Image (spheres, helix red, strand yellow):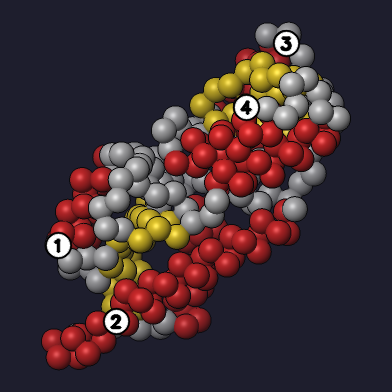
């Protein structure tokens, strides 16, 4: 399953750049030639580069650009987990006159005004992995989050034999992936009435928060058979807490993103 997810993520990155360069950038080649402008500049802003999934996506973009589009320049910005900072980065890209913008939005609502303004100004906007919660003329390239949630919870259901106590580590509430992956979880849980959700908290995609939340859950004394995290960073945080408590191998831990190849 991990290999399948990795292949999907690679295809996502490749298809994103092909889409961007093929349909958005090079459609205007003749116009650029008339303007006497050479090369293209793409502004990229991602949620938080402390998240290894974001690092993986950025590295995939850099490699694709270096291998196939050497005349394309990438300006990569880190929003550092702040929606206001990311919105400002989008606005700055427009002011700088970039040819297009790739954004992995921290918040599907907070980024709507700045992205809408960019599109209105004639700058193509491509949302990556997560989308905005409103169509402002952007192009979205991403995976099926609900399906990912279903696959993950089906794995957990099989591992637990269809019964047990489950704790959910969610992404930021309202984020596209958080909503749709949770829907996928619930699709599967509805088929397994003996699987009970005993805890459910927002870990903000962060490893340290996943660890702290897991420590608190363990201290509660409530039996937990599986921790289902909506990304790998939170899953690893939970795993660190579990192993520190001497419970390694006793609680099933799973995540999404295929960043860390470790069987829990």
Point out which mark residue 222 bears: 3
Q: Position of residue 259 (x, y in %)?
A: 64, 51
- 143 vs 172: above or below: below
Q: Residue at x 61, y 47 (%)?
A: 147
* Residue that label 2 marks: 27
Q: Is residue 237 visible?
A: no
Q: Classify mark 2: residues with Cα within 10 Å, few (<14), some (14-19) or many (20+).
A: few
Depth check, mark 2 against mark 3: the one in front is 2
Asked whether, in this view, residue 221 is left or right of residue 10, the answer is: right
- 165 vs 42: above or below: above
The one of 195 and 89 positioned closer to us in this rendering = 195
* Marks 2 & 3, CB-CB < 8 Å contact: no
Q: Secondary structure at mark 1?
A: loop
Point out which mark residue 168 bears: 4
Which of pointers 3 and 4 lies earlier in the amino acid sequence?
A: 4
Point out which mark residue 71 bears: none
Which quarter of the picture shows residue 100? bottom left
Which quarter of the picture shows residue 41? bottom left
């Amino acid at each position: 399953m991990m290999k399948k997810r990795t292949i999907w993520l690679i295809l996502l990155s490749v298809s994103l750049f092909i889409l961007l360069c093929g349909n958005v950038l090079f459609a205007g080649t003749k116009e650029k030639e008339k303007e006497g402008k050479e090369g293209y500049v793409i502004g990229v802003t991602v949620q938080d580069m402390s998240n290894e999934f974001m690092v993986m996506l950025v590295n995939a973009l850099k490699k694709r650009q270096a291998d196939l589009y050497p005349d394309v320049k990438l300006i990569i910005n880190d929003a550092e987990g702040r929606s206001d900072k990311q919105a400002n980065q989008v606005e700055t890209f427009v002011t700088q006159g970039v040819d297009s913008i790739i954004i992995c939005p921290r918040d599907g609502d907070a980024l709507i005004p700045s992205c809408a303004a960019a599109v209105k100004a004639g700058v193509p906007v491509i949302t990556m992995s997560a989308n905005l919660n409103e169509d402002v003329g952007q192009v979205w390239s991403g995976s099926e989050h609900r399906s990912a949630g279903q696959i993950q919870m089906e794995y957990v259901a099989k591992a637990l034999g269809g019964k047990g106590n489950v704790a959910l580590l969610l992404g930021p509430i309202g984020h596209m992936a958080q909503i749709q992956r949770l829907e996928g979880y619930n699709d599967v849980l509805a088929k397994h009435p003996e699987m009970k959700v005993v805890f459910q908290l927002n870990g903000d995609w962060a490893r340290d928060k996943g660890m702290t939340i897991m420590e608190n859950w363990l201290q509660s004394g409530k039996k937990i058979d599986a921790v289902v995290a909506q990304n790998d960073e939170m899953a690893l945080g939970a795993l660190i807490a579990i192993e520190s408590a001497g419970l390694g191998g006793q609680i099933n831990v799973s995540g999404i993103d295929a960043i860390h190849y470790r069987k829990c």
